[in-house]
Amino acid sequence: MAIITKLALGAGLAALLSTAAHADLTGKVIGFSQIGSESGWRAAETSVTKSQAETRGIDLKFADAQQKQENQIKAIRGFIAQGVDAILIAPVVSTGWDEVLGEAKEANIPVVLLDRGIDASPDLYLTGVASDQVKEGAVAGKWLIDTLAGKDCNVVELEGTVGSSPAINRKKGFDDAVGATSNIKVIRSQTGDFTRAKGKEVMEGFLKAEGGGKGICAVYAHNDDMAVGAIQAIKDAGLKPGSDILVVSIDGVPDIFSAMVAGEANATVELTPNMAGPAFDALDAYLNGGTVPEKAIITESKLFTQADDPQGEYDRRKGLGY
Amino acid sequence: MNRSLRPLLATAAIFVLAYLLAIAQFPAMASTRVLGNFLTDNAFLGIAAVGMTFVILSGGIDLSVGAVIGFTTVLIAVLVMWVGLHPLAAFAIALAVAALFGAGMGAAIYYLRVPSFIVTLAGMFLARGAASVLSPDSIGIKHSFYTTVSKSYLLMPGGGRLSVVGIMMLLVFLAGIVIAHRTRFGSYVYALGGSETSAALMGVPVARTTVLIYTLSSTLAGLAGVVFSLYTSAGYSLNALGVELDAIAAVVIGGTLLTGGYGLVAGTFIGVMLQGLVQTYIVFDGTLSSWWTKIVIGALLFMFILLQRLLHSAAPRRRKILWTA
């Protein structure tokens, strides 16, 4: 009898201790299968994920897939074999995940998708954290509308890689926003392939076609890299970027903030590299409280202008690996 | 002890030692789940590496296998999803296309007297390009056959899964061992790798053997593509990028001489498993950069090249071991 009481007491104590220890994600093992480090943003996402894990006391198992799905599948299988508490994946392609995610589900390991969706049954993953690309374009458009306050403006648009979802969605968001006004017209639109070099080249073409830039009042670039290229082209044409031609773009990389410090860029909409933060929050709520999150967690598309301490924003980002 | 077994034993010893060290650090690596993953996750590489072993044994090289795998996955996806064929019919067509492709490369190598390096490089570009033309986007395959296959596996004690693709790889290795060591074609391959001239003088049908070797390699690459397609239930033109190099590495680590004529199919199996072990270890560790896989494989390759050099310089000059049927 005494033994039973002791056992019961011990069990109660253990339960108490374990609830105390698991009030957050401290000590949890979480696997993260990253696509690779193909862009500065992705490298920043990796370093933010690592620092998020560190501050929360998570033992993060990181696997870089070097752009290969087979490596991601191997990594996920490895995580399952290891018996991790949860898995984060930034999937390299949208197809082909059913089998391995089914295995994770059978092993009762929750999976959270980061920044890209997949083409699989939604019950195979807990939730997905991603930005709303249409909204990013809309926020950029709204900034332009507010800034112009009714003045007439001819906009040139530097699009992302043809057919890529950020290019399609960021165009849609912006076009829908400015299309509702009568003062703003998108007069030219061409792809700059998300690169700095191509952005500069295309902008040079726009400037030539529009009488040396007289007919252009603003440039909207689908990412910051192309905007940085366009700024160079505008300067080469003898105009002042940021005042003669307004520059608005999306992503929030350090270089665009230093351009803002110099007054050469006007606004950027941040695509936050902190996808892991909301993912860990959701996992925390799920693992400790059983709260099932919504299937899609949308990150904030925050607007930064020259008034938002660009120097400080630059300093905060420059060490992240962009 | 049979001299030809030495590189195989060296590879096996390294594998066992490395595995034991890994288990000492991460006891979970001893689970059947990890063993099952070794087979499932490396099935496409293993199957392609069997074909590569024959090519390298004959003194050639096949750079097209990764591209053929990628092409096959896209072709199967197109045939199943757009044309509406049953997956088995699509597999048959894809394997036939791959076999023809290999036969063409083999014929070009023999009749045009072009190094296999160049011909298969052209083959690689052709196959990868054709795959992208068929579809640049990844095509998901939704078919009950695929669901059935991915859901069928033998459950090993401890939760490990022996999947259909894993079993397929084991069967291909068994078949490869039998073909290499127990058939006339196998002994022709070794003879060709020893010296093409003397092989021809001994009455080896060089033309037919060359064409068959590349046909076999491409067909197995096609089969690896089938496995890859089952593995991911999708076809994507950029699948299996650079797998030819992993396959070559597996063959060399497995103890096959790059100059041909010497080596064992079984060694390639350990070479593949060793690569899987390194990758799994890195995932278990979780802090190492995954590029360490490449560094370790590079170091192993270099070590084996040195080892082979030592073994062969110790051997009497001008003698190569020929396997006979």
Image (tube, helix red, strand yellow):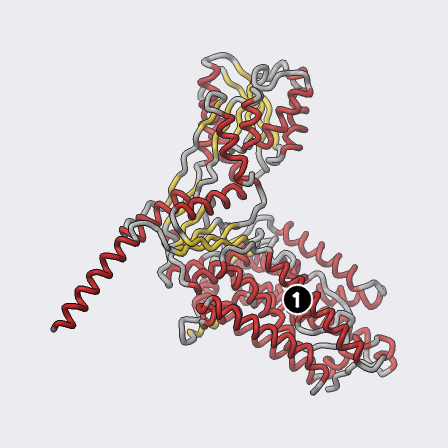
**Residue where numbered disc 1 is placed:** B300
Element carrying mark 1? helix
Q: Residue at x 39, y 39 (%)?
A: A298
Q: Residue at x 57, y 21 (%)?
A: A262
Residue B141 sits above or below residue A306 on the image: below
Which of the two residues, B139 or B247, is positioned nearer the viewer here? B247
Residue A177 sits above or below residue B113 on the image: above
Q: Is residue B226 left or right of residue A201?
A: left
Q: Amino acid at mark 1?
A: Leu
Residue B193 sits above or below residue B284 on the image: below
> For the N terminus of chain A, which image quadrant?
bottom left
Q: Residue at x 54, y 23 (%)?
A: A260
Q: Which percent across, then down, holds residue A160?
A: 57, 35
Image quadrant where residue B144 sits: bottom left
Q: Is residue A296 left or right of residue B87?
A: left
Tell me if I can see residue B83 in this picture.
no
Q: Which percent across, then down, holds residue B63?
A: 71, 61
- Kindly give the residue lying farthest to the top in the view shown: A151
Mark 1 Cα-neighbour bin, 10 Å: few <14, some 14–19, many ≥20: many
Which of the two residues, A306 or A71, is positioned nearer the viewer here? A306
> For the C terminus of chain A, which image quadrant?
top right
Q: Disc 1 sits on a residue from what chain?
A: B
Image quadrant where residue B49 sits: bottom right
Q: Which percent across, then down, holds residue B134?
A: 62, 52
Q: Which percent across, then down, holds residue A285?
A: 30, 48
Q: Is residue B165 left or right of residue A85?
A: right
